[in-house]
Amino acid sequence: MKTGVFGGSFNPPHKGHTALAQRVAEKLGLDRIIVIPSCIPPHKSAGSLASAGDRLNMCRLAFDSELFEVSSIELDRGDKSYTVDTLRELKERYPGDEFFFIIGSDMLSSFHTWYRWEEILSLCTVCAASREKNFRPDFSPYTAEQRGRIVFVDADPVEISSTQVRIRIKSNYACGELIDKKVYDYIKAHGLYDDDLDEYRKLLSDMLDERRIYHSECVSVSAGELARLYGADEDKARLAGLLHDITKNLPASEHIRLIGEMTPLERNNHKVWHQMSAPPFLRERQVTDDPEILSAIRWHTTGKAGMSLLEKIVYTADFISADRDYPDVATVRKLASISPEHAMLYTGRYTINSLVKADRPVHPATLDCYNDMLAHFGL
């Protein structure tokens, strides 16, 4: 039997997952696909995962056809689980099967860094399924023999992420095109992905348009992930990220009233008004008077010298949030996984160069921030 193995956090499983698995099965003529929710994924933060039982139940609802078999093999181990362990166990259970391990094409470039990856290739054929249009795989890290155990499947990807789904659920946006209705109903019935920020979302709905609300939700998620990674206060990071653009859609007269005194450069640079008007607005509305949150919001656009960890996290989150698609965003996301300072040095250079090319003024705080990052790295 030709058996596909499709693992992931499935937090939650969505139509991109099911479409990709079905297309791989069609392309390779698979007889079945074993769907395996991860217990604690080695390559992902586990902090935002739904419970093991909930993810298993959602997978059973999402992958509801004869092609799929949902397995708790990794969840039953109850600890961090590696792909090689799972494939060894499957080989023992089904000795006559030929296994095809399905990964996203974005994972292929780092597959050779996985734990016992060469043994994985001895246990199965690795199927790298396209996650983006016009993707071309890089096989350079692999020998000719290893490449023979790797198949690239051009599967006409459905570009959906679980992060995108969770954000839309939190914002109460329609998700019918993203997840199966049975999964959505399960999420709502069990209160999955609820957090403590709904009171602030009401304010956002009064202040911002839908596109800006979605961006704010994305920044909140990114800020929380960075805070967890670097040991900052996750609750404060998520709230600051959610509220960072709260005054973005205010009329000019209201910005000017809230800000008060401005330099001539600031008065002529409307792009920085929202970061200046947000803290007095939030204090005036008695939304928060937390000085760390307000300061992180105050400097999220320009940055400044001597930023706190929380300020750096919100500044960086605004550059790497899931909705961002500017040309260098993938690079900035990789740098942010190393440190906020690595990302900020790059974004400082990116921002200044962009402003200079457009003959637009550079805020002194942006220059100070960039110089501070140069000093941080001894440059």
Image (tube, helix red, strand yellow):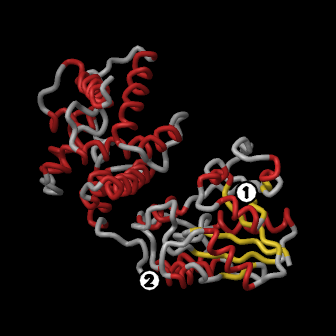
The residue identified by callout 1 is 129
Foreground label between 2 and 1: 1
Instruction: Quarter of the image for the N terminus: give it.
Output: bottom right
Residue 78 appears at what percent x and percent y?
Answer: 48, 81
The crowding category of the residue bearing disc 2, from other C-alpha atoms within 10 Å (few below 14, some 14 to 19, many at least 20), is few
The amino acid pointed to by label 2 is His
Residue at 27 percent across and 66 percent down: it is: 199
- Tell me where residue 52 appears, x and y as whole percent: 49, 80
In the depicted structure, whether residue 25 falls above or below residue 335 = below
Q: Tell me the element at label 1.
A: strand
- Which residue is under mark 2? 190
Name the residue: 78% across, 55% down: 150
Question: With 62 as the anchor, is 375 left or right in this view?
Answer: left
Q: CA distance from mark 2 to mark 1?
A: 32 Å
Q: Decide if residue 255 is on the left or right side of residue 96.
A: left
Would residue 183 appear left or right of 131 to someone viewing this image?
A: left
> Which amino acid, mark 1?
Ala
- Please say if the residues under marks 2 and 1 sit with CB atoms less than 8 Å apart: no
Left or right: where does residue 131 sit relative to residue 53?
Answer: right
Please state the horizontal and vertical placement of residue 237, each as a whole percent of the image.
Answer: 28, 54
Q: Would you say residue 79 is visible in this rendering?
A: yes
- Quarter of the image with the C terminus in it: top left
Q: Position of residue 111 (x, y in %)?
A: 64, 54
